[in-house]
Image: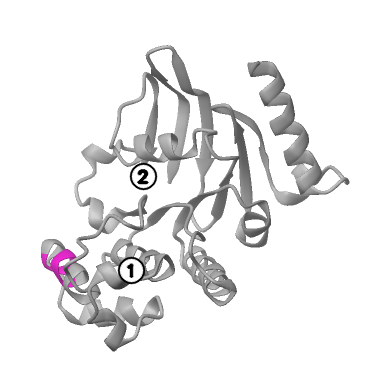
Amino acid sequence: MIEFQHVSKAYREVKALDDVSFTVRRGTVTGFLGPNGAGKSTALRILAGLCRPTSGTATVLGRPYAKLERPGFEVGTVLDAGAQHPGRSGREVLTLGAMLLGLPKSRVDEVLRLVGLTGKEGGRAVGGYSLGMRQRLGIAHALLGRPRALILDEPANGLDPQGIQWMRGLLRDLAAEGCAVLLSSHLLHEVEQVADHIVMIGRGRVLAQGTVAELSRGRGLEQTFLELTANADRSAS
């Protein structure tokens, strides 16, 4: 469903990604775990067609994002929760998205309920939203077309404990329905709670990947993660 094949990205002398390869399968949640600056957002931007890799390919449903016939129905993305017009209401943002996809306005009410935004909250200007509310709105927008793949960059940012619990349940439900979910995070505990598969990245390189049990190695996932990222930092220095 989602595949990176030997993806590298360089900005002049800085290598943001170095030979990144992994796959997200249908009906699973894959956690893309790494510290800030590890290259997670760059990888997701390449996957969403917002920047080009220096080498390698990143595809959704077997194609680059730009070549998807109906991207709104095939993949949903939330790369920046703040990327909404602050003067529009949440409902207006979703209504415009539904119109572009040719969906009925009833779909707007469905996704508002799905992400836990009330009618009153949907009627408020996005500029008055908290970060957590913007995250919910972004996810609602991504789900308008009932996509088969979902790409989320740090979706837990701004969510309170109740919101994080809600998000876990939503992502597990989507995976159970066959959706392929890729979410990036620097929060190991949150990824550990929801992901079927974890890809650890540091300094632009994949350090390890597998299930929680495979990566724990009997010592705990946190210890494995800290050791791998420390080794990556030493190798880069």
Residue drawn at (29%, 72%) of the image: 128
User: x, y percentage for residue 211?
Assistant: 69, 48
| Region rendered in magenta | 95-99
x then y, percent, for residue 124: 24, 79
Q: Secondary structure at mark 1?
A: helix
Q: Which residue is mark 2?
A: 61
Decide if residue 210 is on the left or right side of residue 21: right
Query: Judging from the image, what secondary structure is the residue with disc 2 in?
Result: loop
**Residue drawn at (36%, 80%) of the image:** 117
Identify the image quadrant of residue 94. Answer: bottom left
The circle drawn on residue 137 is: 1
| Residue displayed at 28% across by 37% down | 50
- The image quadrant of residue 118 is bottom left
Q: Residues within 10 Å of mark 1 (few under 14, many from 20)?
A: many
| Separation of residues labelled 2 and 1 (CA atoms) | 25 Å
Is residue 171 in the magenta section? no
